[in-house]
Amino acid sequence: MHKSYLCFFVLAVACIAAAPGAYAIRESQVQEGMDYMHQLCEDSKAPVATLTEAIRNGSLPAAKNAYTAARSYYEQIEVLAYSFPDTDADIDARPYAGFAKGEQDSEYRGFHKIEYLIFRNEDLETALGFAETLEASVNTLCVELTETDRFSQELTWKGAISLAIEVPAKKISSEEETWSDLSMMIFRENLKGIWGVISPFLDDMNTSIRADVQSAYDELVKEFNEICPQYPFNTSSGQACLYSTISISDRRSLVSDYYSLANALLAAKSFLNISDPVEESEIIATASTTPSPSPTSSCVEEAWLIEHDVDLLHERQ
């Protein structure tokens, strides 16, 4: 056995012995979220293919309807995007996210590219190539959603909390589906995605924490149903009330309720003792130096760093 792996093994065992119950790796809960999202991905293949076909046939009304039907699936799946950042960029990137030429950049692709080509420019000829590329990206995503090494409880919770904050902090300002006016569908499907990966952890929470998380989620579901009763929360059609018709007071309520959910999730994460994922920059930094013991550092995180430092050094050799 490589001495570094032996070091990792000894340290990990020591951590468990020294702090029983202080840290738990909930693999089954993470897997349940992965399975849920993988099924969504598989279910999305047909609607995405229908979108491509509608664009190919040159019917603008059909293309708009097909876009609406295909769009909702990834807005649930994106809660796990930290585990597949490259594919996320291929499917759901925005033109300001690292593209020097914005919409005109040759690397810019995905749903938002297709959205403006269909709804704003009405340019189906250009949209066709991007729809075909989107199909390939979705196929890649479905494979990645089965690769367990990509996923962890740390990344799952980071994604859920980040999305619960992003919706009220940014998305409700209508930065979302500007041209299709489908932002309400985005907010709704984001909530479904958050719940899809967080609900498997409910049984690990105490009664009070669990009640707070459940209540915050239920309040948002109620809010969506009251704001848009013609398209109930559990609709699977991808349709939703046009965001341009939503009042300022209703938008304000959504912001408040989303922040309540974010705060409940932050409290639950703390109760479950789920640490933040270690950033790549931290791994690289620790690969060249030997970290000195810290009474505040997580024993398991130190063991994780040793394991990944070894992998990184092997890759560099």
Image (tube, helix red, strand yellow):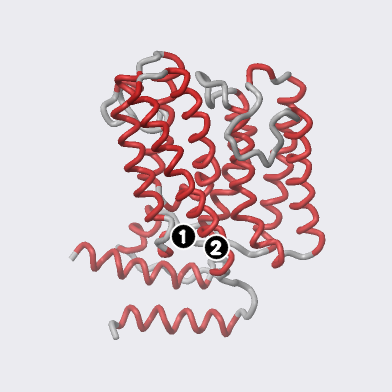
Quarter location, residue 135: top left
* Relative to 169, residue 46 above or below: below
Question: Please, is residue 148 above or below residue 9 in the view?
Answer: above
Q: Position of residue 101 (x, y in %)?
A: 30, 22
Q: Mark 2 is on which residue type?
A: Val
Of the two numbered discs 2 and 1 on the same chain, state the one appearing first in sequence: 2
Q: Secondary structure at mark 2?
A: helix
Q: Secondary structure at mark 1?
A: loop
Judged left or right of residue 128, residue 16 is right
Q: CA distance from mark 2 to mark 1?
A: 7 Å
Residue visible at 76% across and 58% down? 210
Residue under the point 49% across and 41% down: 74
Residue 287, horizontal then vertical, whole percent: 32, 63
* Mark 1 lies on residue: 151
Q: Is residue 33 left or right of residue 3?
A: right
Q: Quadrant of the C terminus?
A: bottom left
Residue receiving disc 2: 30
Q: Nearer the viewer, residue 192 or 88?
A: 192
The picture places residue 234, in percent across and down from the top left corner, at 68, 42
Residue 138 left/right relative to 160: left
Q: The residue under label 1 is which amino acid type?
A: Phe
Point 55% across, 51% down: residue:
158
Circle 2/circle 1 CB separation < 8 Å = yes
- 196 or 262, which lies in front? 196
Q: Residues within 10 Å of mark 1 (few under 14, many from 20)?
A: many
Q: Residue at x 32, y 78 (%)?
A: 4
Establish if 111 lies above or below 11: above
Q: Residue at the top extreme?
A: 121
Q: Which mark is residue 237?
A: none
